[in-house]
Amino acid sequence: MRVYESTIAFHPEAGEVAAKDLLERAKQALVAEGAEVRQIFDWGIRDLAYPIRKQRRAAFHIIEFNGNGRAVAELERNLRIFDPVLRYITVQVDPNRPPLEVHGARRDGVPGEPGGDEAPTGGGRVSSEDADEVDEPRDEQEPS
């Protein structure tokens, strides 16, 4: 059996109860095909790169499971039926990949947090004290 990972984007207004119900139905579909669900992550509500069905945000969930091609086909068939599912993608995971670490939803404006609005230090400019000065003749007039 191979390791797969499905990332699912739910409609943001579907609600927590509806998302949990849909995830449970997806889990049952996988188990019915002989797959073993390893982990289910709640990735939180995030901004989308482009609007999908007039939505700019989505609630993301990740399902990691061991299975075969039939289990993937059945999962994706069920996800196509669910109206609150905006998008999904299932990929085969590299067996040598380190364990998945999913961080919670990004918080805007919190310095030090992923996605936080921390002011850059130095602004990418080099001060004249830090720059290597090149000895060039200067056009200075001598006092008379």
Image (cartoon, grey):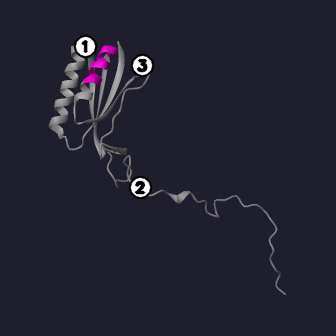
State the residue at coordinates (18%, 26%): 24
Q: CA distance from mark 1 to mark 3?
A: 21 Å
Locate the N terminus by quadrant: top left
State the residue at coordinates (61%, 59%): 126
Q: Which range is magenta?
A: 67-77
Q: Is tag 1's residue or tag 3's residue first in the polypeptide sequence?
A: 1
Q: Residues within 10 Å of mark 3 (few under 14, many from 20)?
A: few
Residue position marked by numbered label 3 in the rendering: 95
* Tag of residue 112: none
Amino acid on which disc 2 is placed: Glu
Q: Are marks 1 and 2 in contact (CB under 8 Å)?
A: no
Q: CA distance from mark 1 to mark 2?
A: 47 Å
Residue position marked by numbered label 2 in the rendering: 118
State the residue at coordinates (72%, 61%): 133
| Secondary structure beneath label 3 | loop
Q: Nearer the viewer, mark 2 or mark 3?
A: 3
